[in-house]
Image (spheres, rainbow, N blue to C red):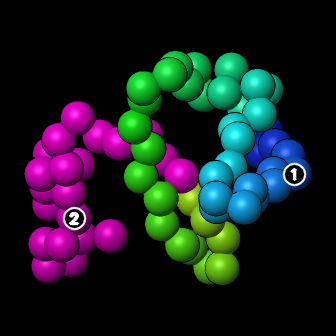
Amino acid sequence: MAAMSTPLKVSSKFQVVIPKGLREQLDLQPGDELVGRVEGGALVLLRRPDSFARHLFGRHREGAP
């Protein structure tokens, strides 16, 4: 899938609407949960994993990438 850049606007309540094209590409549905983090000065939104423990398992082992 090619990277897609779409302008977004932050409302006075600091809310952002995810445009339809992006929602469709990600198959986002009302009620889906996302997590956000900052990477290299960019806001990155990811689907919230079913289990954070399962998602993080092994990530901080010695020698893990």
Element type at marker 1?
loop
Give residue 56's position: percent from left, percent from top.
20, 57
Give residue 7's position: percent from left, percent from top.
87, 51
Q: Say left or right for 17 vs 26.
A: right
As rendered, which of 65 and 7 lies closer to the eye? 7
| Count of numbered tags | 2
Q: Residue at x 55, y 25 (%)?
A: 28
As rendered, which of 37 and 60 lies closer to the eye? 37
Image: 64 above or below 35: below
Q: Which mark is residue 59?
A: 2
Q: Which mark is residue 15?
A: none
Q: Residue at x 24, y 70 (%)?
A: 64
Q: Quadrant of residue 42?
A: bottom right
Kindly check if marks 1 and 2 are in contact, taking CB atoms under 8 A apart as contact: no
Q: Residue at x 14, y 60 (%)?
A: 58
Q: Earlier in the sequence, mark 1 or mark 2?
A: 1
Q: Quadrant of the N terminus?
A: top right
Quick check: is 19 in the magenta stretch? no
Looking at the image, the residue that sits furthest to the front is 12
> Which three-letter amino acid code belongs to the residue tagged 2?
Arg
Q: Say left or right for 51 vs 4.
A: left
> Which three-letter amino acid code belongs to the residue tagged 1?
Pro
Q: Residues within 10 Å of mark 1 (few under 14, many from 20)?
A: few
Give residue 19's position: percent from left, percent from top.
77, 34
| Dominant secondary structure of the residues highlighted in magenta in the image | loop
- In the image, the segment drawn in magenta is 45-65
Q: Nearer the viewer, mark 1 or mark 2?
A: 1
Q: Residue at x 70, y 41 (%)?
A: 17
Element type at marker 2?
loop
Give residue 4's position: percent from left, percent from top.
81, 43
Q: Which mark is residue 7?
A: 1
**CA separation in Å, label 1 and label 2:** 33 Å
